[in-house]
Image: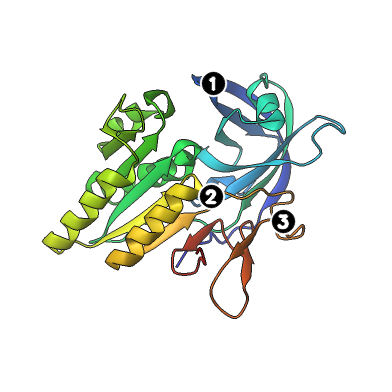
Amino acid sequence: MAYEAGVSATAFTAHVERNRPLGAGYFVLEFAATCETGVADVVPGQFAMVRGDWGRDLLNPRAFSVFEAADSRHFSILGKVFGRGTKRLAAAVPGEKMTILAPLGVGFRPARAGVTQLLVAGGVGLPPLHLQAKRNAAAVGPNAVEVFYGGRTRDDLLLLEDFEAWGVKTHLATEDGSLGTRGYVTKPLVSRVREAAQRGESVELLACGPTGMLQAVRKLGLDHGVPTQLCLEEHMACGFGVCLGCAVPVYGEKPYRYCCSDGPVFDAQEVRWS
C-alpha cells in the first residue's frame, strides 16, 4: 500500500534561490516560496508541477519529484536536460519566478521496524529515494535502508557523498563499468534479494527510474514474494487528474488509473504490464 500525506496541494509562486549544476546535464533548483505551503510535509515520491514565467512558450508545467523540503517555504527539485522545458529550467537564474503546484500524488510508505527497504534508483529516479533514504536513516537508523543506484556511466551517479554521510550502504552499477558493478542495477539487487531469502530477512523494494528498470524490479519482487512499490514516470499536463494523459494499466475493476492522482507510487501487484 502506498502512502499519501494528509495535506492538500497548494498553488503558489516561488523564486529560484539557487541553481546548482551537477554535471552531465543534471541540476538542482532550490526554490523559496512567497507564502506558506504544505511542501514541508511532502512524502517521498510526491511531486511538484513547475512552470517558469514563459508566456505562451511551453504552456504546460513540468513534473518533478520533490528532492528536498527544508520547511514550508524552501524546497528543491533535481532534473536533467532532456528537452526544451528542462533546458529552460537548467538555465534559470536566482530571482527568476516560477509557478508551483505541490505537493501532489501518492508517495512511498515510511520505513517499518524489522523491514529493510532496498531503494532502487536509475538516472533521474534518484530524488524520491534520496529523500526516503535520508528520512529513514534519521528516523529508524541507517541499517534500515540500502540504496541500489544505476546509470549509464559514473557521471549519472550523483550525490553519493550524501549516502556516505548518512551511513547508508550503497550498491552501484554502471552500464559501461566505470563505477560499481558492470551492467544494470538489477544485477546486485538480485543477489541481495536472494541473500535476504536465505537469511530469512524481511525486505521490501522501492524503485524509481526508467520503465525498463521498473519492469525488471517488478518481476523480481513478484517472483520472490517481496513487497514492491514502483514510482512511475509518465508525461503529465495537469498533475491532478483532469487531462487524463497519464493513464497506467492496472488490474481490478477499472483497467486504468492515473499516475498523477492515483500514483505516481503504485504497488507492483496493481500494475498491468505484459
On the question of residue 217 being in view, the answer is: yes
Q: Name the residue under label 3.
A: 245
Residue 199 in the figure: left or right of residue 124:
left
Q: How many marks?
A: 3
Q: Residues within 10 Å of mark 1 (few under 14, many from 20)?
A: few
**Sequence order check, earlier mark of 3 and 2:** 2
**Sequence order check, earlier mark of 3 and 1:** 1
Quick one: SS at disc 1? strand
Quick one: SS at disc 2? loop
Quick one: SS at disc 3? loop
**Residue shown at 72%/56% (left/top)?**
245
Front residue of 15 and 153: 153
**Residue shown at 86%/31% (left/top)?**
55
Front residue of 12 and 128: 128
Q: Position of residue 130 (x, y in %)?
A: 41, 40
Name the front one of labels 2 and 1. 1
**Residue shown at 42%/23% (left/top)?**
155
Numbered mark located on residue 42 in the image: 2
Q: Are marks 3 and 2 in contact (CB under 8 Å)?
A: no
Q: Which residue of the protein is positioned furthest toward the right in this rendering?
A: 56
Against 77, is 4 above or below? below
Name the front one of labels 3 and 1. 3
Q: Distance between the residues labelled 3 and 2?
A: 24 Å
Q: Mark 1 points at which residue?
A: 20
Q: Distance between the residues labelled 3 and 1?
A: 31 Å
Q: Which residue of the protein is positioned furthest toward the left in this rendering?
A: 199
Name the front one of labels 3 and 2. 3
Q: Position of residue 76 (x, y in %)?
A: 56, 34
Q: What residue type is labelled 2?
A: Val
